[in-house]
Amino acid sequence: MVNSTNVAASAVSVAKGVGALTAAGSFAGAATLAYAHFIELNNFQIRHETLPILPAGSDDFTILHISDMHMVPGQKKKHEFMHSLAEINPDLVINTGDNLSHMKALPSLLNALDPLLDFPGVYVPGSNCYYAPVFKNPARYLWKESTSDEGVDPSKERLPTQDMHDAFDARGWVGLINRFDTLTLNGLRLEFSGVDDPHLEFDRHPGFSPTAFDTEPAPSVRLGVCHAPYMRTLTRFVDDGAQAIFAGHTHGGQVCLPGGKALVSNCDLDPSRAKGVSLQSGVPVEVSAGLGTSRFAAVRLFCPPEAVVVTLTAARQ
């Protein structure tokens, strides 16, 4: 005969075990979320890369690549980190967009960027340079097709884009919004081709300057600059003759597996390329994991915010 007392006691024991596991899982989840929000979100890093793409005999050239700041008023630690980047003393700053995450964040952004605006710079916009972010399920990219944004919604709040760009221009930064341009810095001729945000399908490739392939009057390098590294964008830059490409947008995956393995890229770029330098038909593509996140998804896991110092060096013989 089955002892009903023993059965009841076993059931209670199992229930307690399940409850303990559920509680432990909930605690672990809460602890992970707290770490992702309060610790890693402000664990700013500097990543260093070297691209051997300059003509033989060229001096090294230092680029500070910043992206995806998603500024919100009151982000003191981000301000302090960005001010500290001036100590790198870069030859050039490249800003690949998504600068704002709040309608009233422009003063905070310009304050954070102030020391860097003293250096030569170029910029392109991202979607969060045009439209204020709205709440979205932060996990939606785990199942959503990795395609461009769903067009422009007239109901979205417009950010102070022109005021921001005017402030950049007034300090000498050069907008590469569907246009090419040339800068000569420290004896190096930098030929740029830049596009408006591919995620919003605003991109219209201008190619490079007709003189970009001339070997005189100074050593030169051709750089493509965009916000979102969609494959069509990278392919076009390569076809146009870019020797390196700079992009942001991916947040490095933002919430990654241990070791920084990205699950998504928020575009059609393979997630394995969501951060760092990879090759597109032999051309290096530098993708920044960015310095911020949308204020509606303010977490990072195994993917700390970063600025990138890229040293261009002479190509190996």
Image: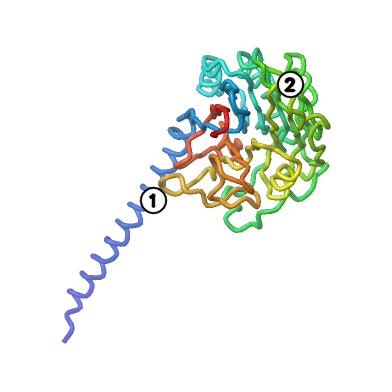
User: Residue 57 falls in which quadrant of the image?
Assistant: top right
Figure check: 68 above or below 81? below
Q: Which colour assignment does the render follow?
A: rainbow
Asked whether 30 or 226 is in front, the reply is 226
Task: Report the quarter where the C terminus lies.
Answer: top right
Which is more toward the observer, 245 or 76?
245
In x, y percent, where is residue 120? 68, 17
Q: Quadrant of residue 40?
A: top left
Q: Residues within 10 Å of mark 2 (few under 14, many from 20)?
A: some
Q: Measured from the top left, where is residue 98 in percent x and y?
A: 67, 33
In this rendering, is residue 98 above or below 274? above
Say what amino acid the circle numbered 1 marks: Ser
| Mark 2 / mark 1, whichever is N-terminal | 1
Q: Nearer the viewer, residue 204 or 259?
A: 204
Describe the element under mark 1 as helix, strand or loop: helix
The amino acid type, in three-letter code, at marker 2 is Leu
x then y, percent, for residue 211: 81, 29
**Which quarter of the image is occupied by the N terminus?**
bottom left
Residue carrying label 2: 183
